[in-house]
Amino acid sequence: MQICIPMNHNSINWDNIRIFLAVARLQSAFEASNHLNIDQSTISRRLKKLEEEIGTELFTRNSQGHLLNANGHRLLEYAEAMEGTISSMESKLGGDSQILTGSIRLGATEGFGGTFLAPHLANFCELHPGLTVDLLALPRLINLSKREADLVVSIERPEKGPYITCKLTDYKLQAYATRQYLEGHHPIENLEDLSKHKFTGYVDEYSFSPKLQYLKNLVPNASVPFRSSSLTAQLYAALQGKTLAVLPCFLAKNHPSLIPVLPTKTGFNRAFWLISPSERKNVARVSELWDYLRHISSINQDYLLGDGLEILK
């Protein structure tokens, strides 16, 4: 069902849209009144006025609060696009900074999300107290077409679809082992020696991207007695000093007991891509996080490539 705005009505009041956004995000007129410092009766009156202007109800009202119905979800897309346009205009014209509110869902690979992004996102939330960020740090690809997230950091660049995409950063991976392992096993002096050693790696059928199957290129006949779909599990297996593992440098750096193995020969670079559905990219809070992720990745490029210290900002 489409929303139709009758032509004989006056233009929709932006203040009413702003109130609609607050109620939609907080799912409560009472919470929205506290957030906007507006009397709850005014909130209810403005919402009713907006529904009259639109010509349809936008919420299901019950004891749990205000939940968007199908028309409400449709209007939400337009309202957030308006919010993004106004925010951009204010920024370019030097107006007062808009206080961003609402939630953002960010998908990321398990290692990058849980290790690198998490502390930076904590800083982002402190900079924007009106925002909440849900980080989905999962060992799989996040499905944007099913609206699982507003933004995704992925090792795969989408070949088609209604997405805005940019390269976020390069990062480096290489083979690691503990000193305990290296001292108790056959010396590793060249790539051929790697075939004499055990590795931990991915379960092939659960590798969510062919780019994760790097052991096949690095050590074609590798012995992999322990496999996991989780990069974190592979890391902690290697820390036991029983196997080698190919790990991102930004992950291994947090564990001094891990030593690079033939770094000039086992090291290789990959890229992370930042992706957002086209209709979400210009939403003010999503755009703000997009820019922040690009900034913190840029200033930490050396760290992600295995050099220098991480910069938290």
Image: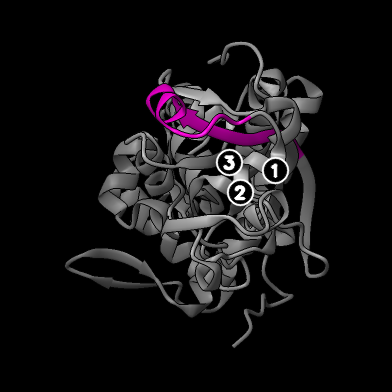
In the rendering, which numbered label is found on residue 14?
Answer: none
Residue 52 visible, this orientation: no
User: Height in image: 190 above or below 134?
Assistant: above
Assign a secondary structure to mark 3: helix
Q: Residue furthest bottom?
A: 1
Type of amino acid at the residue the image marks with label 2: Ser
Q: Residues within 10 Å of mark 3 (few under 14, many from 20)?
A: many
Look at mark 3 in the image and give the residue it sits on.
285
Look at mark 2 in the image and give the residue it sits on.
195
Residue at 36% of width from left, 49% of height from top? 42
Type of amino acid at the residue the image marks with label 1: Glu
Residue at 58% of width from left, 65% of height from top? 208
- In the image, taking residue 17 as reference, residue 181 lies left or right, namely left
Q: Position of residue 236 (x, y in %)?
A: 35, 40
Look at mark 1 in the image and give the residue it sits on.
192
Front-lying residue, 122 or 241 = 241
Q: Quadrant of the N terminus?
A: bottom right
Instruction: Residue 184: say if magenta.
Output: yes
Q: Residues within 10 Å of mark 2 (few under 14, many from 20)?
A: some
- Closer mark to the observer between disc 3 and disc 1: 1
Q: Position of residue 31 (x, y in %)?
A: 28, 46
Which comes before the other along the chain, label 3 or label 1? 1
Which comes before the other along the chain, label 2 or label 3? 2
In magenta, the rendered stretch is 168-188
Q: Quadrant of the C terminus?
A: top right
- In the image, taking residue 292 as reference, residue 105 lies left or right, namely left
